[in-house]
Image (cartoon, rainbow, N blue to C red):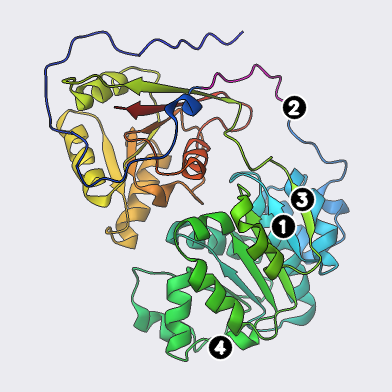
Amino acid sequence: MNQFSKQRPYTKPRPKSNAFAKPKNQKKSGIDPNRLVVRAEPTSYEPYVSKRTIQDLPINQALINCLLHKGFTKPTEIQDRTLEALLNKRDLLGIAQTGTGKTAAFLVPIINELLATKTKNFALVVVPTRELALQVEEEFRTMTKGLGIFSASFIGGTNINKDLQNLRRQSHIVIGTPGRILDLVNRRALDLRLFNTLVLDEFDRMLDMGFVHDVKRILSGLHQRKHTLLFSATLDRSQEQLIADILNNPVTVKVTAGDSAATHIDQDVIRIKAGEDKFKVLEEMLVQSEYEKVLLFEETKHRVKRLCQRLNQAGIRANDIHGNKSQSARQSALKDFKQGRIKVLVATDVAARGIDVSDVTHVINYQVPQTFDSYIHRIGRTGRAGKTGKAFTFVG
C-alpha cells in the first residue's frame, strides 16, 4: 500500500514576502490544478523481457559485437517491436517515453544499412534540443566504434565556422537541431537532397517548441527521402494530420499510451496562500533528506537563474540549465547533477526532453506549466525502472 500523504511537506509559519510573486506579464496556464493531483497506482513492476537476445537479432554480426561490447544483452520493448519493420524500410511512428531505448531503436537499423552500403549523408536525425543531439551522437559513436562509419552533429550555441569545417568531411549520419540545420542549408553547406532516411526524434516536442515551420522546410528539401521514422513520448490529436502527411503507410508501435501522465508517479500540488513566502516553502521541502536528486522547473531563463542563485545562497547545492547558457556550461551542469555533486537542477523546459538522468527522486514545478504535454514530459524524469516517483506543482 502506497503511504503517500496529501499533507503539505512543511509545518513552519512563513513571513510575508513578494520576492517570488507571479509577474504580471506571465502567461496564465490553462491547466486545471486538480489534474495534477494523482496518487501512484500500486503495481508490481514487471519489466519487458524479450524472448530473444542481442545475438538473435537479424543484423550484421559486427554490429552485434559492438552492442555486446556496450553491455546490451536483450532488446528493450520499443527496440524489439520495431526492428523488423525498420529493417524492411517501413515508415514508423513510435510512441515511448525517454529512457525506453528509443535512440538505439532507430540507430540499429540505420547502422545495419550503413554497414552494407557505406552511403554518405544517408540519414538525417532531427531533435529539439542540443543535449539530445549530443546524446544521440554519443550513442552512435559507441555503437559504431571500429566499424568505419561516422557522424556529425550541428546544434545552436556553437561556432558555425567549425560546423562548416566539419561538413567538408562528409558523414554517414547527420544529427542536429532544426534551426542550425536550416542555417547550414541556407549557407549551401548542407544539401538535404542527399539524405535517404529521416528521423524526427521527440517530434511532439519540436512542434510544441514552435519548430513546425522549420520541420516543414526540412521535409520540403528532402527530395530523396524514402524512409521516415517519427518517435515521440506523447501523441497530440492536433498533430495527427501532419503525421499522416509525413509518413507513408506507417507501422505504429506504442510502448506508452502517450496521452496521460504516468500512473507510477505520485503527483500533488503545493497551494501557496496569499502572503506566504513561496521560496521558504520550497527551501523547507528541499532540506528534507528524501529530496536527493531534484529537477526544479521554472518558466523563463531569467527566473531560472534567479531561483538557482537563491538556492545556493540558502546552502542548497544547485545549478541551472537554460537557453542562454553556453553549451559547455549546460553540459557541465548536467554532469554535476548526474554525478550527485549538486542536489537541484533548475531548468526551463529545455531539460524536459531528451535528457536521461537516472534516479531523479522529485520533479518540482515552481509554476504551473503552460501545457499538460509539457507537464507530462517534465514529471517523466522521475519514477524510472519501476520506482515510484514524486512530482509537486506550486499553485497560487
Q: Is residue 146 left or right of residue 323?
A: right
According to the picture, the residue beneath numbered tag 3 turns out to be: 253
Instruction: Identify which amino acid the numbered label 3 is placed on.
Output: Val
Dots 3, 4 in contact, CB < 8 A = no
According to the picture, the residue beneath numbered tag 2 turns out to be: 46
The kind of secondary structure element at disc 3 is strand
Tell me the distance, in whole angstroms, between the alpha carbons under discs 3 and 1.
6 Å
Q: Nearer the viewer, mark 3 or mark 4?
A: 3
Magenta stretch: dominant secondary structure: loop
Residue 280 horizontal/vertical position (percent): 20, 22
Dot placed on the residue nearer the N-terminal end, 3 or 1:
1
The kind of secondary structure element at disc 4 is loop
According to the picture, the residue beneath numbered tag 4 turns out to be: 191
Dots 4, 1 in contact, CB < 8 A = no
Tell me the distance, in whole angstroms, between the alpha carbons under discs 4 and 1.
25 Å
Tell me the distance, in whole angstroms, between the alpha carbons under discs 2 and 3.
19 Å
The kind of secondary structure element at disc 2 is loop
Name the image quarter holding residue 263. Answer: top right
> Looking at the image, which is closer to me, 261 or 118?
261
Tell me the distance, in whole angstroms, between the alpha carbons under discs 1 and 2.
25 Å
For the record, the magenta segment spans 38-46
Dot placed on the residue nearer the N-terminal end, 2 or 4:
2
Q: Nearer the viewer, mark 2 or mark 4?
A: 4
Residue 210 horizontal/vertical position (percent): 45, 62
According to the picture, the residue beneath numbered tag 1 turns out to be: 93
Dots 2, 3 in contact, CB < 8 A = no
Residue 9 horizontal/vertical position (percent): 35, 14
